[in-house]
Amino acid sequence: MDQGVIYFPSKPSIIASGVVGGPLEKKSVFAADFDLLLDDERAEEKSNEKGHKQMALQACQIALEKANIKERDVDFLMSGDLVNQMTPSNFLASTLGIPYLGLYSACATSISGAIVAALLTELGASKYALAGAASQHNSIERQFRYPVEYGGQKPGTAQWTVTAAGYALIAKGQMNSPVIEAATVGKSIDLQQTDPFHMGAAMAPAACDTITRHLKGRGQSLSDYDLIITGDLAKVGLPILQECLIKEGMAQQDVMKIRDAGAEFYGDDQTFLAGASGAGCSASVFFSTILKGLNEKKYERVLAVATGALLSPLTVQQNESIPCTAHAIEISMK
Amino acid sequence: MFATLLIAFIVGGLICVVGQLIMDLGKLTPAHTLSILVVLGSVLDGFNLYEPLIDFAGAGATIPITSFGNSLTHGALAEAEKHGWIGVLTGMFEVTSSGISAAIVFGMIGALIFHSKGQHP
C-alpha cells in the first residue's frame, strides 16, 4: 500500500448534496448547478460571519431535504472554513446538533471532510455523515488580507475568495449514487514560496504529489479517469501542475485535460484576477457540477483534488513560507 | 492656469508612480509603501527640498502622503527653533493635527452612516 492512499471496499456513497452561492457567484460558469444563489452577501444576517454560517446551514439543510433525512438521523458532521478558530462551522454545528469534527485544511477542507466521512462510514460508525466547507468573501478577505472596505490592491496572480458553501451527505453503499472508491491524503509540501498573492504556484506541487501518489497507489494512469479536477490552483497554478506531471512522466495529452475549478469559476472576467479560491470553491463545484455529471453518468470515474494553502496572517507577517496540501477522492458511478 | 494644473498633475502622478513601483517591484504591503513615502517626504524636507517642490507643483506635492512627512519635519523644526529640543516633540503634530483630526472625525462619520459591503454584480 502506498503512503496516504486509502481504499473503501464498502463503497460509501454520496447520496445528496447542497450548494449555496453568494450574489456575485451568479456570474459563475457553475451557477446553473448550484441549489441556491443568495441575493444578499450576508444571507440577510447582520454580520459577514453570521452570513457565512447561515449560508453553510442552508447548504446542509438542502442536502438533508434532498435525501429526506432529519438532522437527528445524521451521525457526524465534518465541516471547516477559513475564519479564525472556524467559528462559522462551530455555530453551524451547534445549530444542527450533529456530532461534529471541525477540520482545517484551508481550501482543501471539502475533501478532507469527505475522506473522514468515508472512513467513518467504512468503519460502520456512520449511517449518514455530512461533510463540506464554506467561505464568504468579505470575512475571509478580512481574515487573511484586508477588510474589503480598505480597497487594497492585488496583483494579477492573486485569487478571489468565493462566497459559497458545499456540503455532501455520505452514506453506506447505495445503488444509483456516486461511490467514493479511494482517497489520498495530502502531504504538507513547502517549497519556500512566501508570497500570499501567489498561492496557485505554492499549491501546484502539493497537487502534483497527491495525484502522482494516488495513481501509483491505485496502479492507474491519468487516462483511467473521465475527469481529473483540482480545487483552486487557478490560471497561474494549473499550468504549473501540468508541467510538474509531465516531468513525472505522464502523457501530455492526458495532462492537458486536467481541469481546475478555480480557473473556470468566474470565466475570463479579469475582475477576479487569476480565478477563484476559498474553501467554498472546491466544495461548491465538486458537490454541484461534478456530482451532477457523475449522477447523469457523463463521467464514470473522477479524481477530485482539493488544494489548500496552509498560511496564517501571522506567518505571512513573519515572512514564513507557505506550506500547501492537496487531498483527493476517487469517485465512480456505475 | 492650464500649465499649473498640468504640472501639479504630472508631479502628483509621479509620486504615485513611485508608490506603485514600491508595491509592485518591492513586493511590499500598502502599509509599508505609505510609511516609506511619509519618511521620504520627511527626509526631503530635512534637506530643504520639499518646499521648493511645493512652490513648483502646488497641489501635486501637497496632496500625496509625502506632504504629511514634510509637515512633520516642518513642525518639528519650527518649534525646535522657538523652544529648543522639546519643540521637536511638541511641534511634530502641531502642523499635522488638522490632518490627523480630520481622519478620525470623517472616519467616525463614515462608520456611523455606512455599512461595509463587498462588490456586487
Image (cartoon, grey):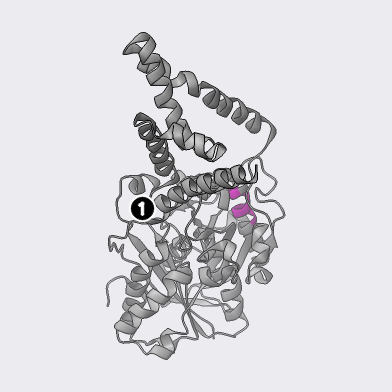
Q: Mark 1 — on which chain does it sit?
A: B
| Residue at left offset 39%, top offset 89% | A252
Q: Against B90, is A329 above or below?
A: below
In the figure, residue A8 lies in which quadrant? bottom left
Q: Amino acid at mark 1?
A: Gly
Q: Nearer the viewer, residue A287 or A169?
A: A287
Work out which residue is located at the far right of the displayed protein and give it.
A39
Location of residue A223 in the rendering, given as x and y in whole percent from the top left corner: 43, 90
- Residue at 64%, 60% in the rendered image: A20
Boundaries of the magenta span: A52-58
Image side of residue A28 versus residue A150, left or right: right
| Residue B107 sits above or below residue A202 on the image | above
Q: Residue at x 44, y 84 (%)?
A: A256
What is the x, y in percent for residue A55? 62, 53
- The percent coordinates of residue A166 (x first, y second) are 57, 62
Image-based side of A9 in relation to A179, left or right: left
Image quadrant for the C terminus of chain A?
A: bottom right
Secondary structure of the residue carrying tag 1 is helix
Nearer to me, A140 or A147: A147
Q: Please indicate whether residue A151 sits to the left or right of residue A198 in the image.
A: right
Residue A2: name its quadrant: bottom left
For disc 1, the marked residue is B26
Please tell me whether residue B53 belongs to the stretch shown in magenta. no
Task: Report the quarter where the N terminus of chain A lies.
Answer: bottom left
| Foreground residue among A173 and B40 | B40
Q: Nearer the viewer, residue A121 or B58?
A: B58
* Position above or below: B1 against A169: above
Whole-percent x, y for residue A6 in the image: 35, 73
| Residue A56 lies in the magenta-colored region | yes
Identify the residue shown where x is 32% and y is 60%: A193
**Most frequent secondary structure within the magenta stretch:** helix
